[in-house]
């Protein structure tokens, strides 16, 4: 439910009842450097899913639960075509980007924080948002 609402571009309003106030977000990704709360991240994903790539989908490849640590890990692939003029004019290029969410929850099951493990530069190269330093294989994975 959480993954579907976040990557479906439903934004903060759709997930806030499942998240504690002030839940933190972190990622070692330049595209998300200024994003530090789950509210900011879900709103960022809403822009990506609804405006930048309205055809976007995600495919969950694996997930696991560590009950002792109250942690959930989800490995998925985000796919979409940049057809919207956000944040740059549409490139009409496809992206296929692997990521992992590591989500922590409290005793009631509410999300307390989330880390996104993601190679944002790879995705930026695929969409044509970054052109310097891109490896040729960035486009091969989108075919």
Image (spheres, rainbow, N blue to C red):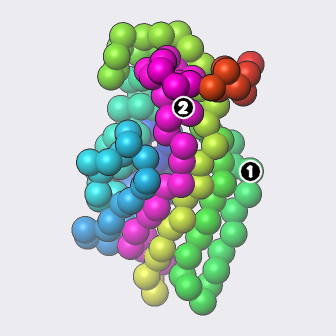
Does 9 sit left or right of 12 as displayed? right
| Residue carrying label 1 | 61
Q: Around disc 2, counting alpha carbons within 10 Å, would you say few (fewer than 14), some (14 to 19), or many (20 or more)?
A: many
Residue 126 colored in magenta in the image: yes
Region of the chain picked out in magenta, as a range: 109-134
91 vs 37, left or right, is: right
Question: Mark 1 and mark 2: span between their CA atoms?
Answer: 18 Å
Q: Is residue 116 left or right of residue 38?
A: right
User: Looking at the rendered structure, which numbered label has been put on residue 40?
Assistant: none
Residue 77 drawn above or below residue 19: above
Give the quarter of the image for residue 143. Answer: top right
Give the class, few, some or many, for how many residues have Cα within 10 Å of label 1's Cα (few <14, many ≥20). few
Using the image, determine if residue 68 lies above or below residue 98: below
Q: Nearer the viewer, residue 57 or 90?
A: 90
- Count of numbered marks: 2
**Is disc 2 placed on a helix, strand or loop?**
helix
Q: In terms of secondary structure, where does tag 1 sit?
A: strand
The residue under the point 53% across, 54% down is 117
- The residue that appears at 54% across and 43% down in the rendered structure is 119
Question: Would residue 139 be visible to someone looking at this image?
Answer: yes
Residue 40's x, y, as percent? 28, 50
Q: Which residue is mark 2?
A: 123
* Closer to us: 123 or 90: 123
Q: Position of residue 142 (x, y in %)?
A: 69, 23
Dividing the picture into quadrants, the one containing residue 113 is bottom left
């Amino acid at each position: 439910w959480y993954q579907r609402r976040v990557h479906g571009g439903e934004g903060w309003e759709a997930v806030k009842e499942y998240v504690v106030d002030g839940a933190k977000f972190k990622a070692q990704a330049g595209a998300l450097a200024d994003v530090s709360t789950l509210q900011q991240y879900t709103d960022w994903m809403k822009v990506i899913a609804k405006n930048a790539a309205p055809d976007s989908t995600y495919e969950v490849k694996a997930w696991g639960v560590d009950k002792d640590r109250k942690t959930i890990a989800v490995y998925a692939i985000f796919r979409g075509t940049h057809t919207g003029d956000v944040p740059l004019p549409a490139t009409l290029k496809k992206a296929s980007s692997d990521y992992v969410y590591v989500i922590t929850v409290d005793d009631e099951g509410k999300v307390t924080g989330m880390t996104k493990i993601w190679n944002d530069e790879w995705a930026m190269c695929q969409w044509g948002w970054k052109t310097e330093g891109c490896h040729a294989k960035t486009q091969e994975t989108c075919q």
